[in-house]
Image (tube, rainbow, N blue to C red):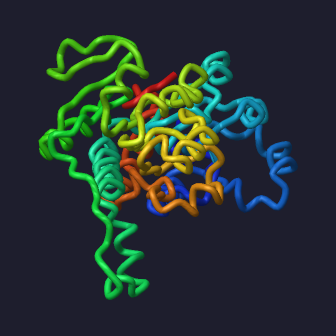
Amino acid sequence: MALKQCKVLIKGKFLPPKLIENIEKTFTAFRLWEAEDETIFLAEKGADIDMLVTSGNAVMGAPAALIAALPNLKAICSNGVGYDSIDTEAARSRGIVVTNTPEVLNDCVADLGMALLLDVARRISEADRFTRAGHWSQGRFPLSSKIGGKVCGIVGLGNIGQAVARRAQAFDMQIHYYNPRSRPDVPYTRHESLVALAQQADFLVLTLPRGAATRHIINAEVLQALGPQGYLINIARGSVVDQQALVEALATGKIAGAGLDVFEQEPQVPDALRQLDNVVITPHIASSTRETMAAMADLVFENMLAFARDEPVLTRVV
């Protein structure tokens, strides 16, 4: 079809401005977040929509109800590697193409994972607060933990997990991992269970996908196995950790600390986590660099162009 004939629904205003600009210059586009009443808008315009642009985060996504409100929808293009908040089964049942933006964010997510690991181990954020508060004149800051020679245990050795492993190796860390299937192509030590990995790990880094099979996979038993000298680093999804069990483990010293970029009910972060000095928290920014955001936006737009021109999309999920 002619590009301007393709009608696109943009789900949320938090998509990159350049992507929204490109979409609106190229297609006939509608901003869902500007509708006074989304239900009325979808009832009036839903049948006209050919393509939906969204992201995989919990606030946006593409739930079954939204897909049902777009009876002629042909493609969902997501700005992000995760697509757990997109109902892929509903899309598949109707033959709707779903795309995401893999690979382009691996390095930046891994960078933040290592930054959180370094921060919580060396107590950088805590030391910053200590210095700003003027406490240095009253005495030395407490000791922190060395990371060289320690075991970095990676849960989910996909592309991001391997990027973390390469960075951890540069700090002379030993790499162990847990993956449902063995990876004979990597020189790292595999464990048969999460508990076995946690028992050996000094730092447990989560890079696994969200889903029913991984919900609360990091539970009280795993945290107990990680132990009072161990640290948890989560750059995956908040749902993979039993957050209540994590708060209890941190507050009682069952683990030494945590670096968290993701949470169960984003953007809400429990007060109990925010008040702990042995936790470094960031607002889901692992992929939030100018370079990665630009690359993701470009890939979304390339998928959209390919689909509208009846060409194979570049990164198809469904």
Residue beneath the point at 36% across and 42% down: 229
119 above or below 78? below
264 left or right, relative to 171: right
Residue 72: x percent and y percent? 70, 30
**Residue 138 position within the rendered picture, expressed as x and y whole percent measured from the top left:** 35, 85
Residue depicted at 14% across the width and 21% down the height: 187
| Rendered image quadrant of residue 199 | top left
* Relative vertical location of residue 51 with respect to residue 98 in this rendering, above or below: below
Q: Which residue lies furthest to the front in this view?
A: 139
Q: Residue at x 40, y 57 (%)?
A: 288
Q: Nearer the viewer, residue 162 or 102?
A: 162
**Depicted 267 relative to depicted 166: above or below:** below
Instruction: Please give the name of the residue rendered at 56% of the width and 50% of the height, measured from the top-left corner.
Output: 251
Q: Image check: 35 left or right of 30?
A: right
- Left-right relation of 270 to 56: right
| Residue nearer the viewer, 196 or 136 | 136
Q: Where is residue 129 in the image (x, y as percent from the top left)?
A: 41, 75
Q: Position of residue 206 (x, y in %)?
A: 41, 35
